[in-house]
């Protein structure tokens, strides 16, 4: 087994802010607000708020009017890949988590968004792989491994996958988070969630999902 790290960081672009990300590690971007132009040798795209992209090449990011971007790096090092050029962009590390990855297995990088109405909950469940979440709006309580943690917007948390989790969203406002998970390749296009209690499996599920990336690594 080789040790990899899933690293979530926040990139805040001023007006006209630009940065160059080098090729190498797998990277996923999610635009929280504003807009970012991504230009690489294989891909050019304009990303508006609530959109995402996978980067695996040298890519220039430019925001004409400013933007807030969450970036996930899958790296052998515990720190995010540093930009080779950076002007008017501030970086903040949110969370770095070590993963045990079998080098002989093909994995799936999934980036999606999960949204809850006021008072929504995710019944006790597991996932078939680890991942890091970043809260976008509202608030959320995560109960797992005998502990309870409360998160506010732009705070991050890690879920190992096999450890059961119960999530309770804000009672008074909609709640949403973005996440990247590393999953078995056979889950491409399929849900990764498993409910722990038989009585919860057929209950109405208030959360909704928007998948942006299902990229084989």
Image: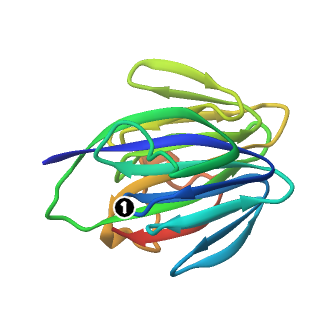
Q: From what the image shows, is residue 98 above or below residue 186?
A: above
Residue at 33% of width from left, 68% of height from top? Answer: 217
Residue 104, position as x, y percentages in the image: 14, 64
Which residue is more in the foreground, 122 or 12?
12
Residue 199, position as x, y percentages in the image: 48, 46
Quarter of image, res 158:
top left
Residue 160, position as x, y percentages in the image: 36, 39
**Total labels drawn:** 1
Would residue 17 be found to the left or right of residue 83 on screen? right
Q: Residues within 10 Å of mark 1 (few under 14, many from 20)?
A: some
Residue at 62% of width from left, 22% of height from top? Answer: 150
| Residue 94 seen | yes
Q: Label 1: state its secondary structure.
A: loop
Residue behind mark 1: 24
Residue at the farthest bottom position = 42
Which residue is more in the foreground, 3 or 105?
3
Q: From what the image shows, is residue 91 above or below residue 64?
A: above
Which residue is more in the foreground, 109 or 148?
109
User: What colour scheme does the image use?
Assistant: rainbow
Residue at 65% of width from left, 61% of height from top? Answer: 61
Residue at 35% of width from left, 36% of height from top? Answer: 78
Would residue 183 be found to the left or right of residue 202 on screen? left
Residue 114, position as x, y percentages in the image: 64, 52
Quarter of image, res 98:
top left
Would residue 64 be found to the left or right of residue 184 on screen? right
Quarter of image, res 190:
bottom left
């Amino acid at each position: 087994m080789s040790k990899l790290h899933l690293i979530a960081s926040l990139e805040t672009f001023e007006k006209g802010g630009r940065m160059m990300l080098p090729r190498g590690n797998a990277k996923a971007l999610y635009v929280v607000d504003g807009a970012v132009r991504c230009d690489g040798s294989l891909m050019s795209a304009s990303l508006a708020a609530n959109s995402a992209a996978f980067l695996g090449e040298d890519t220039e990011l430019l925001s004409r009017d400013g933007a807030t971007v969450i970036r996930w790096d899958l790296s052998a090092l515990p720190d995010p890949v540093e930009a080779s050029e950076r002007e008017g962009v501030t970086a903040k590390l949110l969370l770095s988590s070590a993963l045990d990855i079998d080098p002989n297995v093909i994995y799936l990088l999934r980036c999606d968004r999960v949204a809850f109405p006021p008072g929504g909950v995710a019944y006790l469940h597991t996932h078939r792989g680890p991942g890091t979440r970043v809260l976008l709006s509202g608030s959320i309580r995560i109960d797992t491994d005998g502990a309870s943690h409360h998160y506010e917007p732009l705070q991050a948390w890690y879920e190992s996958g096999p450890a059961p989790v119960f999530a309770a969203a804000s009672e008074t406002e909609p709640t949403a988070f973005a996440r990247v998970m590393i999953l078995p390749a056979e889950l491409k296009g399929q849900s990764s969630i498993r409910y722990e209690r038989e009585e919860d499996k057929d209950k109405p599920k208030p959360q909704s999902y928007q998948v942006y990336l299902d990229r084989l690594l």
